[in-house]
Amino acid sequence: MAPVVMVVEDEEALGLLLKYNLEKEGYEVVIETRGNKALADVEKYAPSVILLDWMLPEISGVEICKLIRSKPDIKNIPIIMLTAKGEEEDKIKGLSAGADDYVTKPFSIPELMARVKANLRRAPEISTTKELVFEDIRMDLVEKKVFRGENYIHLGPTEFRLLKMLMETPGKVFSREVLLKTVWGDNIYVESRTVDVHIRRLRKSLNDFGPDYIRTVRATGYSIDINPVGDSE
């Protein structure tokens, strides 16, 4: 079956343009123009990726993004935010709400198609696997152990949870706020810079036995990537 792309966009002309080009690429397309119906449609159609406009009637795309991330059955669907807001703080706000990617209007159709394909590749598949593997790093999720090649890596529980989150979606950039919420929980107050401290510990433990795969995206957050050179701290 062709992947389903949901377009949540209240500009009819743009919605039709996106539908035409997405169908041309072989995707099935669902369009929703009203923000208050978007969440129900996401749960109904379970799309492979969502193109979500920031400015919508009744409820903003940022709020919809947060709601999607709060629902266990749909929280892992990749979300690409479409917005006329181009300031860095707006981008950070969108990513902090749980968006996987961010495209500023006006955008080129070929670029957007490339972003859709990239996010589909990164989307986690439902799996019963008991381990995660990225390059030479292996996580045993049953025994709660981490290996780099043949070397056992001792990690504290927080560093283990951070690494697990990064390895579940390689290449995806997680904001500090999202990492805090997921790894530490909503009911524990810690400063965002606490994430930096634990990332440094995680790096130190992993990098004794190989190259640095943890990428720092300045002013935004972290990902695990095979080519982090130039961003790493």
Image: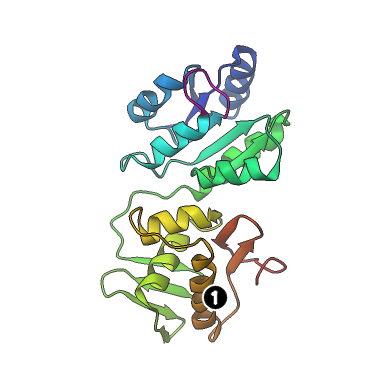
Judge from the rendering whether residue 227 lies leftward or rightward of residue 120; answer left or right: right
Q: Where does the C terminus fall, quadrant-wise? A: bottom right
Residue 89 visible in rendering: yes
Identity of the residue drawn at 58% across and 38% down: 116
Q: How many marks?
A: 1
Q: Amino acid at mark 1?
A: Arg
Q: Is residue 196 magenta-colored?
A: no
Q: Where does the N terminus fall, quadrant-wise? A: top left
State whether residue 198 is above or below residue 3: below
Residue 3 visible in rendering: no
Residue 216 position by quadrant: bottom right
Q: x and y percent of residue 6 in the render?
A: 48, 27
Q: x and y percent of residue 63 in the render?
A: 46, 33
Q: x and y percent of residue 189 in the render?
A: 40, 59
Q: Residues within 10 Å of mark 1 (few under 14, many from 20)?
A: some
The outermost residue toward the top is: 12
State whether residue 131 is above or below residue 205: above
Q: x and y percent of residue 54 in the render?
A: 57, 29
Q: Nearer the viewer, residue 38 or 5?
A: 38
Residue 146 position by quadrant: bottom left
Q: How is the image coloured?
A: rainbow
Q: Is residue 55 magenta-colored?
A: yes
Q: Nearer the viewer, residue 218 or 8?
A: 218
Identity of the residue drawn at 33% across and 26% down: 44
Q: Nearer the viewer, residue 72 or 115?
A: 72
Q: Main secondary structure of the magenta part?
A: loop
Magenta-drawn segment: 54-60
Judge from the rendering whether residue 208 lies leftward or rightward of residue 36; answer left or right: right
Identity of the residue drawn at 69% across and 65% down: 231
Residue 229 position by quadrant: bottom right
- Looking at the rendered structure, the secondary structure element under dot 1 is helix
Residue behind mark 1? 200
